[in-house]
Image (tube, rainbow, N blue to C red):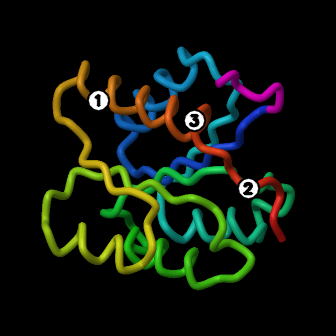
Amino acid sequence: MTPSAETIEVLLVEDSPADARLTQEAFRDGKIRNHLTVVSDGAAAMSYLRREAPYASATRPDLVLLDLNLPKVDGREVLRRIKSDPALQSIPVVVLTTSEAEEDVAKAYEYHANCYIRKPVDLDSFLHIVSVVENFWLTVVKLPQGAP
């Protein structure tokens, strides 16, 4: 499958500056045209998705990469809010987190996460996982275009 000529919009919700930087680098090195926006807490994520100040002109993401352990509004709650909001629920959400807790996995799927990926601790594995996510979600999967 060939990548679309259009730019894929990705929202990364990640409070770790190191993980955010690595994810940005992995996406930058990818072969798919994408624009990655990073917010560092759950409250900012919801403001971005709802296009509230200071994100009034934000572009609707085609994909959300969501950490669970976030300040202000927990990632589990962000996921619940996204998937319970008719205007946002069609956006695929990939949980990308360090949590191995079975309860987190179960809750993520209960809240309708599209997939759950545990972040590897070593650099090469982390970059590989981000590359796999990018290739699968941005080239193989057909994403919904501009919903409400």
- Mark 1, mark 3: which one is toward the viewer? 3
Q: Which residue is mark 3?
A: 140
- The furthest residue to the left: 101
> What secondary structure predominates along the stretch shown in magenta?
loop
Query: Could you tell me how far apart the alpha carbons at marks 2 and 1 are, in whole angstroms?
Result: 27 Å
Q: Amino acid at mark 3?
A: Val
Q: Please state the extent of the stretch shown in magenta in the rendering.
A: 1-6
SS state under label 2: loop
Where is the C terminus found, in terms of image quarters? bottom right
User: Who is closer to the viewer here, 3 or 29?
Assistant: 3
Q: Residue 2 placed where, x, y %?
A: 69, 21
* First in sequence: mark 2 vs mark 1: 1
Q: Amino acid at mark 2?
A: Pro
Q: Residue 9 placed where, x, y %?
A: 70, 43
Q: Residue at x 54, y 81 (%)?
A: 81
| Image disc number at residue 92 | none
Figure check: 56 above or below 134: below
Q: Residue 34 placed where, x, y %?
A: 68, 31
Q: Residue 36 placed where, x, y %?
A: 63, 37
Q: Residue at x 78, y 67 (%)?
A: 51
Query: Could you tell me how far apart the alpha carbons at marks 2 and 3 are, in whole angstroms?
Result: 13 Å
Q: Is residue 96 left or right of residue 86?
A: left
User: Who is closer to the viewer here, 24 or 54?
Assistant: 24
| Image disc number at residue 144 | 2
Q: Which residue is mark 1?
A: 126
